[in-house]
């Protein structure tokens, strides 16, 4: 399981950039990152994860949770999302696939 | 006058340590100010450590100083001046590694009664005997046994700002719920209070400079363990088990728990591994043997059933201190060495520190 090596919020572009220790580079637009927040407030309990649309979310800070997750805090006070590295990586790969597919079509 | 693009092109040649990616692509380079022959580079706030930032700063200064037309280079990491918005801090203070503490090693067991605290205490003392500065955090809130095992009835001193000094005994620093409780009162607290106490033990105790903080976890895989895993990056976990328990569901759960929170498992310590007859010196595997292969983990030590270990615990003078030459003390010393080796072999998997 690759781990983040460098986490850089890029406010001007409304995205969070993560460099992984296998040299993979991920960009998480804030709307995308916030939209896939895995917390129970956003997703409820049990069932599938759904994308939650939030208008123009602003990232305030990103905390490290133990050894295994990141905790983004947003300007609207939302801060209960604990994104495991595994989850973050799969979100990034999914986005990359989506982008590839949309440029192909 | 030199152009911003030309400067960016120069900076694009500087790679981030440990990566093939350059600092511009990584988004580390924020604003670039050019005034005549003077250049100021602002680096964006990120999770990069001070050490890495110093390195990058140095590379930037060398690279740009060599460019004709540039006389003066300044690199600022983080805050732009003036009316630019504050960049967000990364890794909020409450969740950073403990200042002054190099490594945090957790000692866990799938279930109670396997001698975890005995192992934790002797491991901590053995690490100390090997020249490390060691702290021992008894996170077993419900059954804190470490003060008894270490033979101390001291009370931690209060410091400034509601901080606490740990108790010193046998050359290591200790903190335990046992220091704050009346002997006989059972501890019946709700989860949030336990979590709060563990946080305080981590953050409000003046541990000072430690090479290792050994954390004696409560048995099982409940709240306390999860809080610890969330609050501080555990550098390694050691699982204590008896030989026949090692294949049981409880230990499997302990292993799964560590894996889920990304804590590298340094290995298993088999406690009560075998019985050493004090008369003839023969070894009897009374609790069976060989179950550990099923876990896929390495046994980094076997501690036999020897009366002195229990006596050490009961008398408040653990065997490593009481009889350093005893074969079992030697086993703990080897164990401590193995922990140090295994720990070095596994890099801390959290946002990488470039040591």
Image (cartoon, coloured by chain):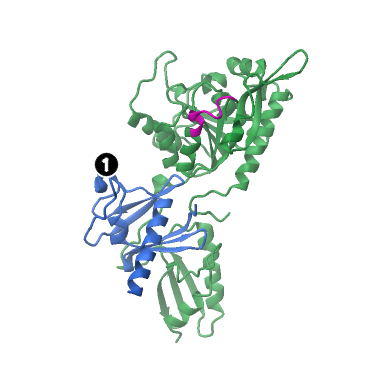
Letter of the chain shown green in the rendering? B
Q: Which residues are magenta?
A: B244-252
Magenta-colored stretch includes residue A82? no
Front in this rendered view, residue B90 or B156: B90
Quadrant of the snapshot with the N terminus of chain B: bottom left
Q: Is residue B171 visible?
A: no
Quadrant of the snapshot with the C terminus of chain B: bottom right
In the image as oriented, which residue stretches furthest toward the front? A105
Q: Write down the quadrant of residue B186 in the picture.
A: top left
Q: Secondary structure at mark 1?
A: loop
Letter of the chain shown blue in the rendering? A
Q: Is residue B34 visible?
A: yes
Front in this rendered view, residue B148 or B84: B148
Residue sitting at x 51%, y 54%: B352
Q: Residue B66, how many percent across, how many down?
A: 57, 80
Say left or right for B161 vs B18. left
Residue sitting at x 54%, y 48%: B348
Q: Residue B74, how many percent across, how many down?
A: 48, 71
Q: Is residue B256 above or below residue B154?
A: below
Label count reads 1
Residue sitting at x 55%, y 76%: B63
Q: Residue B278, how many percent across, how many down?
A: 73, 14
Q: Write down the quadrant of residue B18 in the picture.
A: bottom right
Residue sitting at x 59%, y 18%: B313
Which chain contains the residue that carries disc 1?
A
Q: Residue B309, how many percent across, how many down?
A: 64, 19
Say left or right for B132 vs B247. right
Say left or right for B179 vs A35. right
Residue at numbered disc 1: A45
Q: Residues within 10 Å of mark 1 (few under 14, many from 20)?
A: few
Front in this rendered view, residue B219 or A12: B219
In the image as oriented, which residue stretches furthest toward the right? B280
């Amino acid at each position: 399981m690759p781990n983040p090596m460098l986490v850089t919020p890029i406010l001007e572009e409304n995205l969070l950039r993560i460099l992984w220790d296998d040299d993979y580079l991920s960009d998480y637009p804030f709307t995308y990152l916030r939209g896939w927040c895995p917390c129970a407030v956003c997703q409820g309990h049990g069932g599938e994860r759904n994308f939650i649309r939030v208008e123009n979310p602003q990232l305030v800070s990103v905390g490290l949770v133990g050894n295994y997750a990141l905790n983004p805090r947003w300007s609207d006070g939302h801060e209960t999302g604990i994104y495991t590295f595994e989850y973050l990586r799969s979100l990034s790969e999914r986005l990359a696939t989506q982008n590839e597919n949309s440029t192909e079509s | 006058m030199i152009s911003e693009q030309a400067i960016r092109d120069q900076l694009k040649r500087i790679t981030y340590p440990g990566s093939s990616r350059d600092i511009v692509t990584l988004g580390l380079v924020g604003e670039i100010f050019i005034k005549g022959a003077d250049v100021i580079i602002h680096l964006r706030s990120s999770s990069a450590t001070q050490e890495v930032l110093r390195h990058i700063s140095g590379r930037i200064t060398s690279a740009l100083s060599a460019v004709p037309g540039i006389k003066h280079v300044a690199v600022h990491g983080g805050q732009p001046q003036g009316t630019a918005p504050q960049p967000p801090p990364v890794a909020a203070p409450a969740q950073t590694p403990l200042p002054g503490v190099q490594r945090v090693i957790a000692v866990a067991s799938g279930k109670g009664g396997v001698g975890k605290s005995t192992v934790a205490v002797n491991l901590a003392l053995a690490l100390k005997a090997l020249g490390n500065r060691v702290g021992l955090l008894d996170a077993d809130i419900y059954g804190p046994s470490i003060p008894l095992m270490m033979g101390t009835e001291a009370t931690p001193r209060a410091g400034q700002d509601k901080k606490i000094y740990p108790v010193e005994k046998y050359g290591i620093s200790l903190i335990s719920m046992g220091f704050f409780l009346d002997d006989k009162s059972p501890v019946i607290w709700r989860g949030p209070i336990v979590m709060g106490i563990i946080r305080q033990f981590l953050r409000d105790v003046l541990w000072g400079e430690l090479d290792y903080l050994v954390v004696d976890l409560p048995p099982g895989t409940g709240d306390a363990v999860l809080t610890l895993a969330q609050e501080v990056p555990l550098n390694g976990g050691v699982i204590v088990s008896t030989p026949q328990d090692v294949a049981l569901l409880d230990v499997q759960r302990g292993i799964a728990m560590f894996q889920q929170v990304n804590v590298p498992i340094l290995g298993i310590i088999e406690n009560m591994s075998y019985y050493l007859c004090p008369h003839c010196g023969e070894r009897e595997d009374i609790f069976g043997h060989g179950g550990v292969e099923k876990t896929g983990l390495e046994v980094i030590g076997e501690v036999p059933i020897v009366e002195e270990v229990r006596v050490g615990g009961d008398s408040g003078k653990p065997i490593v201190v009481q009889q350093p030459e005893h074969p079992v003390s030697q086993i703990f010393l080897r164990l401590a060495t193995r922990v140090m080796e295994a720990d070095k072999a596994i890099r801390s998997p959290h946002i990488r520190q470039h040591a």
